[in-house]
Image: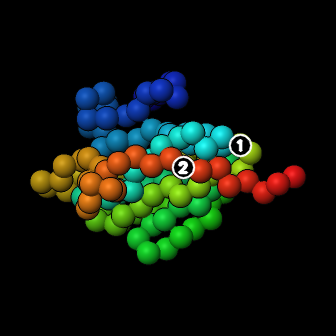
Amino acid sequence: MLIRTTSGQRLTAENRPPGCPTHSAGRFRLRADGSSRFDRHHHDFDEFWFVMAGTGTISVGESVLQVQPGDIIYTPADTDHDVLAVTSVQDLEVFWLSWSLPQGASGQHLHRTLADAAKHLVPAQTAAL
Protein backbone atom coordinates (compact mmCIF):
# COMPACT_ATOMS: atom_id res chain seq x y z
CA MET A 1 0.00 0.00 0.00
CA LEU A 2 1.41 3.40 -0.97
CA ILE A 3 0.96 5.77 1.97
CA ARG A 4 2.69 9.06 1.07
CA THR A 5 3.89 10.15 -2.34
CA THR A 6 5.70 13.48 -2.06
CA SER A 7 8.71 14.66 -0.10
CA GLY A 8 6.64 17.29 1.71
CA GLN A 9 4.31 14.75 3.31
CA ARG A 10 4.96 12.66 6.37
CA LEU A 11 3.19 9.82 8.04
CA THR A 12 1.52 10.91 11.29
CA ALA A 13 -1.23 9.74 13.64
CA GLU A 14 -3.61 11.94 11.65
CA ASN A 15 -2.99 10.37 8.24
CA ARG A 16 -1.69 6.83 8.77
CA PRO A 17 -3.78 3.89 7.58
CA PRO A 18 -5.91 2.05 10.15
CA GLY A 19 -3.87 -0.54 12.01
CA CYS A 20 -0.50 0.99 11.03
CA PRO A 21 1.72 0.82 14.15
CA THR A 22 4.10 3.59 13.04
CA HIS A 23 3.92 6.84 15.04
CA SER A 24 5.64 8.94 12.38
CA ALA A 25 7.87 8.67 9.34
CA GLY A 26 9.15 11.05 6.74
CA ARG A 27 12.26 12.77 5.56
CA PHE A 28 14.14 15.94 6.22
CA ARG A 29 16.78 17.76 4.19
CA LEU A 30 19.59 19.96 5.47
CA ARG A 31 21.07 22.17 2.79
CA ALA A 32 24.74 21.99 1.89
CA ASP A 33 24.92 25.81 1.77
CA GLY A 34 24.78 26.09 5.58
CA SER A 35 21.37 27.77 5.67
CA SER A 36 19.36 25.01 7.39
CA ARG A 37 18.36 24.97 11.07
CA PHE A 38 17.99 22.04 13.47
CA ASP A 39 17.42 21.60 17.20
CA ARG A 40 19.19 19.41 19.74
CA HIS A 41 16.37 17.27 21.12
CA HIS A 42 15.27 13.90 22.45
CA HIS A 43 12.04 11.92 22.42
CA ASP A 44 10.15 9.75 24.86
CA PHE A 45 10.19 7.01 22.19
CA ASP A 46 12.80 5.30 20.01
CA GLU A 47 13.63 6.69 16.57
CA PHE A 48 15.57 5.46 13.53
CA TRP A 49 17.25 7.60 10.88
CA PHE A 50 18.33 6.31 7.47
CA VAL A 51 20.79 8.53 5.55
CA MET A 52 19.63 8.72 1.93
CA ALA A 53 22.04 11.30 0.46
CA GLY A 54 24.91 13.57 1.45
CA THR A 55 27.27 13.30 4.38
CA GLY A 56 27.22 14.96 7.76
CA THR A 57 28.24 15.07 11.38
CA ILE A 58 25.63 14.20 14.00
CA SER A 59 25.58 13.66 17.73
CA VAL A 60 23.70 10.85 19.46
CA GLY A 61 24.10 10.97 23.22
CA GLU A 62 27.79 11.57 23.90
CA SER A 63 28.91 10.17 20.52
CA VAL A 64 29.77 12.32 17.51
CA LEU A 65 29.32 10.38 14.28
CA GLN A 66 30.17 10.92 10.62
CA VAL A 67 27.26 9.67 8.51
CA GLN A 68 26.92 8.81 4.84
CA PRO A 69 24.31 7.31 2.51
CA GLY A 70 23.15 3.90 3.69
CA ASP A 71 23.85 4.52 7.38
CA ILE A 72 21.12 3.65 9.88
CA ILE A 73 21.15 5.53 13.19
CA TYR A 74 19.20 4.26 16.19
CA THR A 75 18.32 6.80 18.87
CA PRO A 76 16.88 5.26 22.04
CA ALA A 77 14.22 7.14 23.98
CA ASP A 78 15.56 9.98 26.18
CA THR A 79 18.80 10.27 24.13
CA ASP A 80 19.72 13.74 22.86
CA HIS A 81 20.54 13.93 19.16
CA ASP A 82 21.44 16.73 16.77
CA VAL A 83 22.84 17.48 13.33
CA LEU A 84 26.12 19.37 13.73
CA ALA A 85 27.21 19.87 10.11
CA VAL A 86 26.63 18.98 6.47
CA THR A 87 30.00 17.79 5.16
CA SER A 88 29.27 17.26 1.46
CA VAL A 89 28.47 19.50 -1.48
CA GLN A 90 25.18 17.60 -1.67
CA ASP A 91 22.29 18.21 0.76
CA LEU A 92 22.03 15.79 3.68
CA GLU A 93 18.76 13.87 3.28
CA VAL A 94 17.50 11.66 6.10
CA PHE A 95 14.45 9.42 6.39
CA TRP A 96 13.16 8.94 9.95
CA LEU A 97 10.88 6.32 11.44
CA SER A 98 9.42 6.01 14.90
CA TRP A 99 7.35 3.01 15.85
CA SER A 100 4.33 2.98 18.14
CA LEU A 101 4.51 5.27 21.18
CA PRO A 102 4.89 3.94 24.71
CA GLN A 103 1.94 4.63 27.01
CA GLY A 104 1.96 8.31 28.02
CA ALA A 105 4.57 9.40 25.45
CA SER A 106 4.17 12.89 23.97
CA GLY A 107 5.35 12.04 20.46
CA GLN A 108 7.17 15.39 20.23
CA HIS A 109 10.66 16.87 20.16
CA LEU A 110 11.64 17.41 23.80
CA HIS A 111 14.36 19.82 24.97
CA ARG A 112 16.39 19.91 28.18
CA THR A 113 17.17 23.63 27.91
CA LEU A 114 15.89 26.71 26.09
CA ALA A 115 19.17 26.75 24.18
CA ASP A 116 18.47 23.23 22.89
CA ALA A 117 14.99 24.32 21.76
CA ALA A 118 16.38 27.24 19.73
CA LYS A 119 17.04 25.97 16.23
CA HIS A 120 20.70 26.54 15.36
CA LEU A 121 22.25 26.92 11.93
CA VAL A 122 23.74 23.69 10.61
CA PRO A 123 27.02 24.78 9.03
CA ALA A 124 28.45 23.48 5.78
CA GLN A 125 31.88 22.00 6.42
CA THR A 126 33.00 20.78 3.03
CA ALA A 127 36.66 20.38 2.18
CA ALA A 128 38.12 22.88 -0.27
CA LEU A 129 38.49 21.46 -3.76
* Residue 72 at x, y percent in the picture: 54, 59
Q: Amino acid at mark 1?
A: Gln
Task: Indicate which disc residue 122 carries.
Answer: 2
- Residue 122 visible to an observer of this rendering: yes
* Residue 127 at x, y percent in the picture: 78, 57
Question: Who is closer to the viewer here, 63 or 38?
Answer: 38
Residue sticking out furthest to the left: 104
Question: Who is closer to the viewer here, 3 or 119?
Answer: 119
Image point 30% across, 63% down: which residue? 77
Residue 42 position by quadrant: bottom left
Q: Secondary structure at mark 2?
A: loop
Image point 30% across, 44% down: which residue? 23
Image point 44% across, 75% down: which residue? 62
Is the residue marked by circle 2 packed among few (<14), some (14-19), or many (20+) residues within 10 Å?
Answer: many
Q: Amino acid at mark 2?
A: Val
In the rendered image of this protein, does residue 92 appear above or below residue 111?
A: above
Say left or right for 128 vs 10. right
Q: Secondary structure at mark 1?
A: loop
Question: Who is closer to the viewer here, 10 or 79?
Answer: 79
Is the residue marked by circle 1 packed among few (<14), some (14-19), or many (20+) residues within 10 Å?
Answer: some
**Circle 1 is placed at which residue position?**
90
Q: Rounded to the nearest whole Å, what is the CA distance between mark 1 and mark 2?
A: 14 Å
* Residue 50 at x, y percent in the picture: 54, 52
Image point 87% across, 52% down: which residue? 129
* Residues at discs 1 and 2 in contact (Cβ within 8 Å): no
